[in-house]
Image (tube, helix red, strand yellow):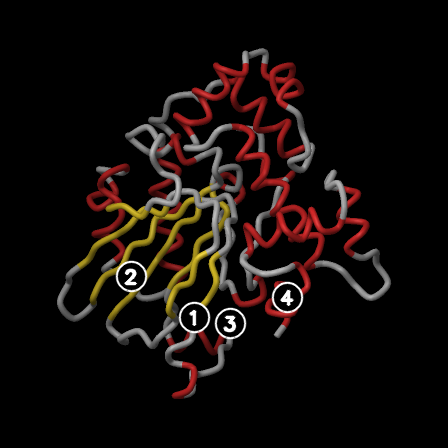
Amino acid sequence: MFNLSELYYPITANPAGAGEYLPVKALQPYIRCFWGSVSETEEQVEEPKNRESDGEKNRTETIIPDSCMDIIWEWDETTGEDCGIFCGINDAPFEVGLGPQPAARQRFAIRFHFWAVHLFADEHLQEVLNVHAAVEQYFSYFRRELGEKLRGTLTMSERIAAAEVFLLRRLEYTSRSSDGMMNAVHRILRSRGVVSAGELEHSSGLSSRQLERLFRQHIGLPPKKVADLVRFQNAWLDLYRLTPRSGGLQDIVYAYGYSHQSHFINNFKKFAGRTPLDALNHARS
């Protein structure tokens, strides 16, 4: 697959604290990153983190639409119990608790680019919008081929290595995507989400009805909603990268085709749960 990730880099509401690990080059067209629990030794060597004070135990984190989908696998090293959830693509922000996690409780997650999930799933993705479901519902083989192996790992590096072997092996058995759909995805990414239905039809060689069916089947959203999420993510990345010498909100308004600044702010708040400046202050605090 052409490496579409070279055109698109979605980020979280708090990019500096996301704790993300990039996959090997061969998987970058499909996998955005890995994330999860790390040992105390790894925290000191790889990514130092502040210990939570008593007053921070009940704080929350805002999850914004990043256009990705995740498999999150958790296990208890003491009891051996494990389970996993598949988080489908989301189009609205939500809050998650950041309370302390028992030392024996471990977590490892794979974050997929939205255009690649269907290559690994054994079910269509028509109903995955804002869905949190058991991993087995969409990836019946996951526990057997990777979940059980994760219990024997001690470090994030070991978990990533096991996951990469698993994912590369699964790609050997996957069926091809629709070329027309992938051409439309490429057009959305290259235009940074600012694209018309007519342009997608022209680039894909498919009718709007055919594109709608393929996008809903393989991504879970219609093309217009996918483009909206891509536009939001690119605008958020540009905003996050703003420096005192760079342009301000008005440049982003113009670049992404918003009719005026209020239009951009309202649209951004729908996805981020905050105004652009509030989101920026939150990410940098």
Residue 42: numbered disc: none
Give the left or right position of residue 167, taking residue 68 as reference.
Answer: left
Q: Which residue is mark 3?
A: 47
Could you say whether the residue bearing mark 2 is in a helix, strand or loop? loop
Q: Which residue is mark 4?
A: 278
Please name which of the two marks, 2 or 4, marks the residue nearer to the observer: 4
Labels 3 and 1 touching (C-beta < 8 A)? no
At label 3, the amino acid type is Glu
How far across and down, in percent of the image, does residue 59 sit?
Answer: 42, 75
Please name which of the two marks, 4 or 3, marks the residue nearer to the observer: 4
How far across and down, in percent of the image, does residue 233 sit?
Answer: 61, 47
Number of other residues with Cα within 10 Å of mark 2, as a class: few under 14, some 14 to 19, many 20 or more: some
Counting residues from the start of the chain, the first of labels 4 and 3 encountered is 3
Marks 1 and 2, how far apart in space?
28 Å
Labels 4 and 3 touching (C-beta < 8 A)? no
Counting residues from the start of the chain, the first of labels 3 and 1 encountered is 3
Could you say whether the residue bearing mark 3 is in a helix, strand or loop? loop
Please name which of the two marks, 1 or 2, marks the residue nearer to the observer: 1
Q: Which residue is at a point 86% across and 63% down the rendered structure image? A: 245
How far across and down, in percent of the image, does residue 8 sit?
Answer: 62, 42
Counting residues from the start of the chain, the first of labels 3 and 2 encountered is 3
Number of other residues with Cα within 10 Å of mark 1, as a class: few under 14, some 14 to 19, many 20 or more: few
At label 2, the amino acid type is Thr
Counting residues from the start of the chain, the first of labels 1 and 4 encountered is 1
Q: Which residue is mark 2?
A: 153
Residue at the bottom extreme, as displayed: 54
Q: Which residue is mark 1?
A: 60
Give the left or right position of residue 102, taking residue 55 as reference.
Answer: left
Marks 1 and 4, how far apart in space?
16 Å
